[in-house]
Image (cartoon, grey):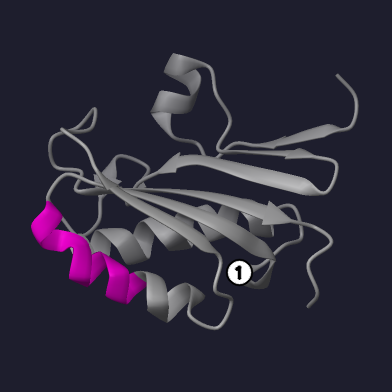
Amino acid sequence: MSGLRRVQSGSPWEEAFGFARAVEAGDRVVVGGTTSFKGDVLYGEGDPYEQARVAMDNALEAIAELGLGAEAVIRTRILLTHARDVDEVGRAHKEVFGSVRPVMTMAVVSGFVDPRILVEVELEAFRGAPA
């Protein structure tokens, strides 16, 4: 399908499950569930704040490949495995997106594909956002 661009991060799950880290369709860019893995290394094991920061950075790296930055982000979705981590993950979100103020959803889930993952982040960005 023309008009679509895809970004791969090199995650082994992308190949195994057949998905892209980010997809651009017109002015809209969506980033799928992103964790604090870089290659096969999980950063911030046991630390929800650090996992959130690295996951957000990983998601922002994906949109950067499409020429966008944090200022283009219009929606974040953050999934956590523990409600106790809401404040730490919220602090990380504010540090990264506080000046941008995207719409945000935070939900507690029962778990992820790797039990060491505490946080997963999704983003939506809009190319027409003012710089």
Q: Residue at x 21, y 37 (%)?
A: 109
The x, y position of residue 25, in whole percent, is 79, 37
The x, y position of residue 48, in whole percent, is 19, 60
The x, y position of residue 76, in whole percent, is 49, 55
Q: Residue at x 67, y 55 (%)?
A: 125
Image quarter in which the N terminus is found: top right
Main secondary-structure element of the magenta-colored stretch: helix
From what the image shows, is residue 72 above or below residue 15?
below
User: Could you tell me if residue 46 is visible in this image?
Assistant: no
Q: Residue at x 46, y 75 (%)?
A: 96
Amino acid at the residue labelled 1: Ala
Q: Which residue is mark 1?
A: 70
Label 1 crowding class (10 Å Cα cut-off): few <14, some 14-19, many 20+? many
User: Could you tell me if residue 129 is visible in this image?
Assistant: yes
Tell me: 50 left or right of 70: left
**Residue 91 shown in magenta:** yes
Residue farthest to the right, as pictured: 2
What segment carries the magenta color?
83-92
Tell me: 45 left or right of 56: left
